[in-house]
Each structure stands twice: as structure tokens, then as C-alpha cells.
Image (cartoon, helix red, strand yellow):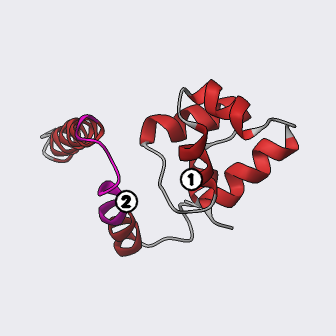
């Protein structure tokens, strides 16, 4: 199931209208409609808020599972979806990756 369909299904299960959810997310109802129909992609902050509102994991919304995806698929997924992010979200991802790389180097170059 596609992301927009999942969001619509979660919304309907909770008995929340598009207008109500849009208000909760502080977005325009038309934008929410475009997300639900797959015509627009939500920003990472909107996606995070949707996950919080419906008490679900963002990975489940995005169909990300550790065992099913190989590294190449994960990299393709990241690259493909980064084009939908705002600059501030991309900057945040870059900072996270930098810290992770630095920690990886520290752990793997430690001399005992």
C-alpha cells in the first residue's frame, strides 16, 4: 500500500476528517488531499507528526524493514526521497550522517 493510502486509511480508522487532520498538522487541507492521493509527498516533519498522531512507526508508514531491503535498495530509497525534502531537513540528515560516520570511524579505528 502506498504512503498516501496508508495515511488516508489511518485517518478514516480514527474517524478524523481531512480538515481536522490538516489542522492538527498545520497544513492546508488541499495539500493533505494531494498527499493522500499520491500527488504530493509529505515533508519529514509532517511525516513525523502523522506518525505521532496515529501512534505508528515512521518505518511502517514508509514500508522500511531491515531484513527485506539490501544496502543498495536503501541507498536508492534515500536518494530518491531526499529530493522531496526542504533544505533544513536535508541539512539535518547531513549532520546525522556526519556524526554517524565520525562514530563509526572512532569505533573501527580504536587500538586496544
Neighbour class for label 2 at 10 Å: few (<14), some, many (≥20)? few
Residue 94 visible, this angle:
yes
Q: Is most of the magenta stretch helix, strand or loop? A: helix
Q: Quadrant of residue 71?
A: bottom left
Q: Is residue 51 above or below residue 36?
A: above
Q: Is residue 25 left or right of residue 56?
A: left
Residue 55 visible here = no
- How many C-alpha atoms fall within 10 Å of the one at disc 1: few (<14), some, or many (≥20)? some
Which label lies toward us, 1 or 2? 1
Quarter occupied by residue 22: top right
Q: Which mark is residue 81?
A: 2
> Is residue 111 shown left or right of residue 88?
left
Q: Residue shown at 78%/52% (left/top)?
A: 9
Instruction: Provide residue 87's location: percent of width, then percent of height.
Output: 22, 40
Which residue is pictured at 35% across the width and 54% down the height?
Answer: 84
93 left or right of 19? left
Residue segment shown in magenta: 78-88
Figure check: 19 above or below 79: above
Q: Position of residue 46 (x, y in %)?
A: 50, 37
Q: Which mark is residue 75?
A: none
Residue 18 among magenta residues = no
Q: Which residue is pictured at 63% across the width and 55% down the height? A: 36
- Front in this rendered view, residue 39 or 3: 39
Q: Are marks 1 and 2 in contact (CB under 8 Å)?
A: no
Question: Which circle's residue, 1 or 2, is located before the other in the chain?
Answer: 1
Which residue: 57% across, 45% down?
30
Front-lying residue, 62 or 18: 18
The label on residue 35 is 1
Amino acid at each position: 500500500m502506498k504512503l498516501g493510502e496508508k495515511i488516508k486509511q489511518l485517518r478514516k480508522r480514527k474517524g478524523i476528517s481531512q480538515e481536522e487532520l490538516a489542522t492538527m498538522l498545520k497544513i492546508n487541507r488541499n495539500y493533505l488531499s494531494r498527499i493522500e492521493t499520491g500527488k504530493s509527498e509529505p515533508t519529514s516533519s509532517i511525516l513525523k507528526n502523522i506518525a505521532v498522531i496515529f501512534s505508528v512507526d515512521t518505518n511502517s508508514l514508509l514500508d522500511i524493514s531491515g531484513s527485506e531491503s539490501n544496502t543498495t535498495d536503501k541507498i536508492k530509497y534515500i536518494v530518491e526521497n531526499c529530493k522531496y525534502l526542504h533544505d533544513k531537513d536535508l541539512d539535518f540528515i547531513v549532520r546525522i550522517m556526519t556524526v554517524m560516520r565520525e562514530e563509526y570511524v572512532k569505533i573501527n579505528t580504536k587500538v586496544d
